[in-house]
Image: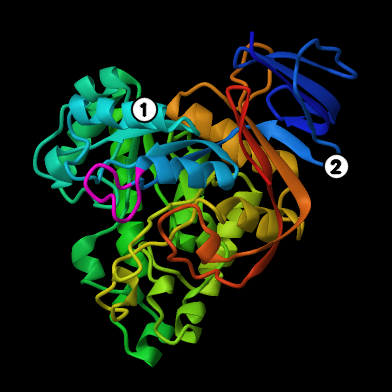
Amino acid sequence: MSRLLVRNGRVIDPVQGIDELMDILIEDGRIATLGREIKAVDAPELDAEGLVVAPGFIDLHSHLREPGYEYKETIETGCLAAAAGGFTAVCCMANTNPVNDEPAVTRYIMEKANRAGAVKVYPIGALSKGCKGDELAEIGEMVRAGAVAISDSPNPVANSLLMRRALEYCKSFDVPMIVHPQDELLSDRGAMHEGRVSTRIGLRGMPGAAEEAFVARDILLAEFTGGRLHLGHLSTAGSVEAIRVAKARGSRVTCEVSAHHFSLTDEDVAGSNYDPQWKMNPPLRTDEDRKAIIAGIADGTIDAIVSDHAPHHRDEKEMDFADAPFGISALETAVSLALDRLVRPGVIDVPALVRLMSVTPARIVGVPGGSLAEGSPGDLTILDLERSVTVDPDLFVSKGRNTPFAGVTLQGGPAATVVGGRVVWQR
């Protein structure tokens, strides 16, 4: 029997209403006992004094790149980066090469993740064949093979009829559809947020209305079909308000935001001297949008915080801003950003953060986790709220070094990551 005894930690489990100093005994990969001064024979111990012990954090939105783009990231390096960032599981998007639009690719991803032996990986299957938005993919077969959700992200679904059919089909398998809400015609090949800043610095912009139009459409279609809609990486005040109104009338819709969208704005793009490390999709919006996102986190409108990890090769991010690819390497910074920008200033408390990064993500995609109840998976995210973290991309475990946070010092970060009762990363 494999065992691990975690001692003296501040154990936080919002599901059970626990926030107190306790020990946790994990046996054969599952939570066996919670209590004080647990005695266990032949159990290695992990001292968590002064640390927070939470159910493992689950990232709902990551791009692990493999198969097909291993020069950007592999499943193994992505899993190791997730562990270093405090995540015990990641949900990986389908825009690989070949696209994860059939069960053979789904099984390949799961087998590679199992061999990597770090964190759990939950594949997200493509909504359409090739993520092209023309024809539904084999949704049922992918779900049976292990896919936990369906998405074409980062491609939006322009065809409203296809969107309706996909929501209806996903409903029959009780899996969520994760969408990238964006009207590409309205976005008009923009590189950053459209507004005063883009006009001032001369870059083509993407208006917030391009996101908000599809948020409104997709909410209406979800209510019409009864399907489970999850709106990915929202970035505007209008989108947050649309979710707030939809939830007030009983809509099943859920949503997420990435850490960089509550941390940065389009003024940071201007201050970067056209550095493509600040180029992402959706783009960094105005300070008013950023504040609206923070307000949505505080009042419970927003359900989850994600990394939106999108690693690229260094050469790709050295192109001109307009031509460089969208996205940042985020698995190793998301938790520290949430602690520094949300918990430290008192926007939310630590139990609320655990709900946003563990409890609710587990519920949205229907995977085990989100609680430390006896019999639950022995997956733990252990946090040091006082840790000083200076972001150094050269020290990233991920192959992706593309981050706008290089040199930034944050307060709070992961201290250890435990998966199935095994310490997979420790500071």
Prevailing secondary structure of the magenta residues = loop
Q: Give the residue furthest to the right.
A: 37
Q: Is residue 294 above or below residue 382?
A: below
Q: At 77% from the left edge and 39% from the top edge, which residue is drawn?
A: 52
Q: Residues within 10 Å of mark 2 (few under 14, many from 20)?
A: some
The answer to whether one can see residue 297 in this image is: yes
Q: Residue 374 lies in what quarter of the image?
A: top right
The answer to whether one can see residue 172 in this image is: no
Q: At 32% from the left edge and 42% from the top edge, which residue is drawn?
A: 93
Element under label 2? loop
The reply, left or right, for residue 84 in relation to residue 323 is right
Looking at the rendering, in which quadrant would you find the N terminus? top right
First in sequence: mark 1 vs mark 2:
2
Q: Position of residue 362 (x, y in %)?
A: 52, 29
Q: Residues within 10 Å of mark 1 (few under 14, many from 20)?
A: many
Q: Position of residue 407 (x, y in %)?
A: 60, 73
Q: At 55% from the left edge and 60% from the top edge, which residue is drawn?
A: 395
The reply, left or right, for residue 288 in relation to residue 354 is left
The reply, left or right, for residue 96 in relation to residue 192 is left
**Nearest the camera: 52 or 127?**
52
Q: Residue 25 lies in what quarter of the image?
A: top right
* Magenta stretch, residue numbers: 65-74
Tell whether position 47 is magenta: no
Q: Residue 166 lies in what quarter of the image?
A: top left
Residue 50: mark: 2
Q: Give the residue furthest to the left.
A: 134
Q: Amino acid at mark 1?
A: Val
Residue 148: mark: 1
**Marks 1 and 2, how far apart in space?**
35 Å
**Nearest the camera: 29 or 269?**
29
